[in-house]
Image (cartoon, grey):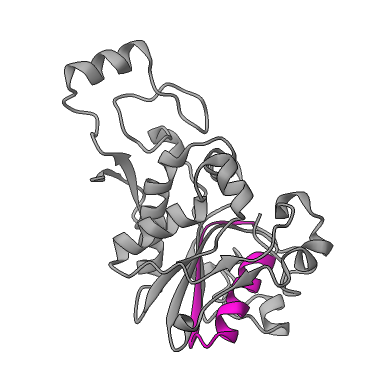
Amino acid sequence: MHIQRTEVLPVSSRIEVVTGAFGTGFLLPGRFLLHFFFPSCCASCGAARRGVGGGGLCRACWRALPLIDGEEACQTCALPSAAPICRACRNGASPFRRAAAVARYEGVTRRLVHALKFRGHDILAAPAGTLMAATARIRGLDQDCSAVVPVPSTSRRNRDRGYDPGALLAREVARELGRPLLALLSRVREAPPQSTVPAAQRRRNVLGAFATSRAARGTRLLLVDDVMTTGATVFEAAHTLVAAGASRVDLLVLARTPEAGPLHHDHLETA
């Protein structure tokens, strides 16, 4: 799908807002009537969206995303307001060389992620992935990268919603960055969703949850997921890739919690 960028956020962010495939100009008669009688509503605020496209959010909500200033975030876990390296990363061994996140997991971002993961709004993946790719370029995560790798959800949850949110985001990131998309990780056991598990138990919940192949050997990978909270899932995924011989793993997520949990670098999770 062709994505047209027509509005730009403040210069300090340097990330463009995606308004959709058709913009807000000329509409085919059928589309005009459909929109007139059945207006599309924003997945975040519920307001009717003008025109078509927009990736499921209204312009105001796209512009209201609480973007993270990468210069002020931890370089290796993307924790906001913890530059250059947060205390947990100084005290523990992060599997990531660098990490970046688009926005804080609060307000509009939280509603966006919930709509994508739990309410079937897969249309959000394309514009959100475009914003992630822009963040990757700003933070230099696209440089010297062999491939983009999604963190897979479980087969059961993917069957329930009909798609894998992380895979959709990673596909868009790979397309935007011009890098191969490699499904190097697979889930080898089912586990309760991390969002339902207390923070202290999240490492145990995903321990040994992933498998990979020899194809990871010698690669420089950009790992992509939707949300990072305590870090358990992405840390476990990265350790699996490194153990299989990946020479480097960087991390890119759509959303990051503003504060790390008490067990942050005990290798704990994404929501």
The magenta segment is: 232-257
User: Quarter holding the C terminus?
Assistant: bottom right
Does residue 10 sit above or below 253 in this rendering? above
Quarter of the image for residue 133 reads bottom left
Does residue 123 sit above or below 11 in this rendering? above
Nearer to me, 118 or 157: 157
Seen at 64% across and 56% down, the residue is: 257
Nearer to me, 123 or 84: 123
Does residue 102 sit above or below 156 in this rendering? below
Nearer to me, 74 or 115: 115
**Residue 251 magenta-drawn?**
yes
**Residue 101 magenta-drawn?**
no
Left or right position of 136 against 206: left
The spot of residue 269 in percent (x, y) is: 68, 63
Left or right position of 179 against 239: left
Quarter of the image for residue 122 reads top left
The spot of residue 204 in percent (x, y) is: 79, 68
User: Quarter holding the N terminus?
Assistant: top left
Left or right position of 6 against 116: left
Tally of numbered discs: 0
Seen at 76% across and 74% down, the residue is: 266
Seen at 24% across and 20% down, the residue is: 31
